Amino acid sequence: MAAPKKLIAGNWKMNMLAADGVALARAVAADGQGAACDLLVCPPATILAAVADAVAGSAVAVGGQDCHEAESGAYTGDVSAAMLRDAGASHAILGHSERRHGLGETDARVRAKTIAAHGAGLTAIVCIGETEAERDAGRTLDVLGAQIAGSLPESGVDAANTVIAYEPVWAIGTGRTPTLDEVAAAHGHIRATLESMLGGDAAAVRLLYGGSMKPENAADLLSVDNVDGGLIGGASLDAASFLAIAAAA
């Protein structure tokens, strides 16, 4: 089976007010026309609808950065998957390391959010990754396998509704990246784990690399087997840098 089309996804995190976010989205949409990969931007929830309007009719998709697992209720400050969809999102980032390690999100919570995202018609970008201590202890592959098993629903997972993003925690925002061999080993293990769960359908599930991907190293990282795109942090806040990564795909 041919490798899936690459996806370059920008996680804006807690950055951008409306005017700057809309301008960035429009620049990505205008200059990204004809890109050979799929493009996705994930702005803060406060400007998601405005960004979705700004890129409407273009090749750029829009995603949320998180969602609550409940459809509605007394969850002050939270946003449901249906609300993201209503605001124009087609994707949702779930289980990002900043939420797992900063806010204590468990695999079980990420699984519940993934089920909610699927139920709302969103594609879930499920993030997994090891800490530096876990890597130094030689536990990287065990951690990744356990996170996949714990974070994905037992049924209903396919290439249309699920993307996996591997983000070594120690490489996010630090400027450090694993070696290409280390990335290949991690992504190969993720693919094999998915195959044990999904069978042949696993070949079409896109696996993104996240963790200090930038224009300077994108081509090398994107050439690694089983790397089907990138989840981009800081470099996604600049249209030229983001699109340079897309061009490398």
Image (tube, rainbow, N blue to C red):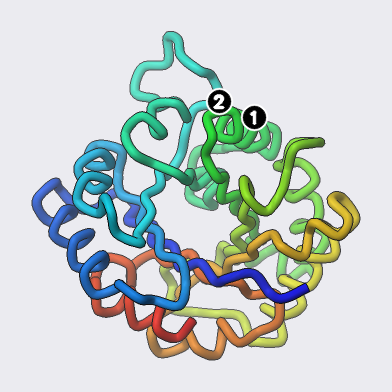
Identify the residue at the far left of this view.
19
- The residue beneath circle 2 is 69
Look at label 1 and name its amino acid: Ala
Look at label 2 and name its amino acid: Glu
Left/right of residue 17 with respect to residue 213 in the rendered view: left
The residue carrying pointer 1 sits among few (fewer than 14), some (14 to 19) or many (20 or more) residues within 10 Å by Cα, namely some
Q: Residue at x 19, y 51 (%)?
A: 54
Left/right of residue 118 with respect to residue 40 in the rendered view: right
Work out whether residue 12 can be spotted: yes
Is the residue 218 above or below the residue 123 in the image?
Answer: below
Q: Position of residue 71 (x, y in %)?
A: 51, 18
Q: Where's the N terminus, which quadrant?
A: bottom right
Left/right of residue 119 with respect to residue 1 in the rendered view: left
Q: Position of residue 57 (x, y in %)?
A: 28, 53
- The residue beneath circle 1 is 112
Is the residue 94 above or below the residue 26 in the image?
Answer: above
145 or 61: nearer the viewer? 61
Q: Residue at x 49, y 47 (%)?
A: 93
Is the residue 119 above or below the residue 100 in the image?
Answer: above
Q: Position of residue 197 (x, y in %)?
A: 86, 50
Q: Residue at x 44, y 62 (%)?
A: 9
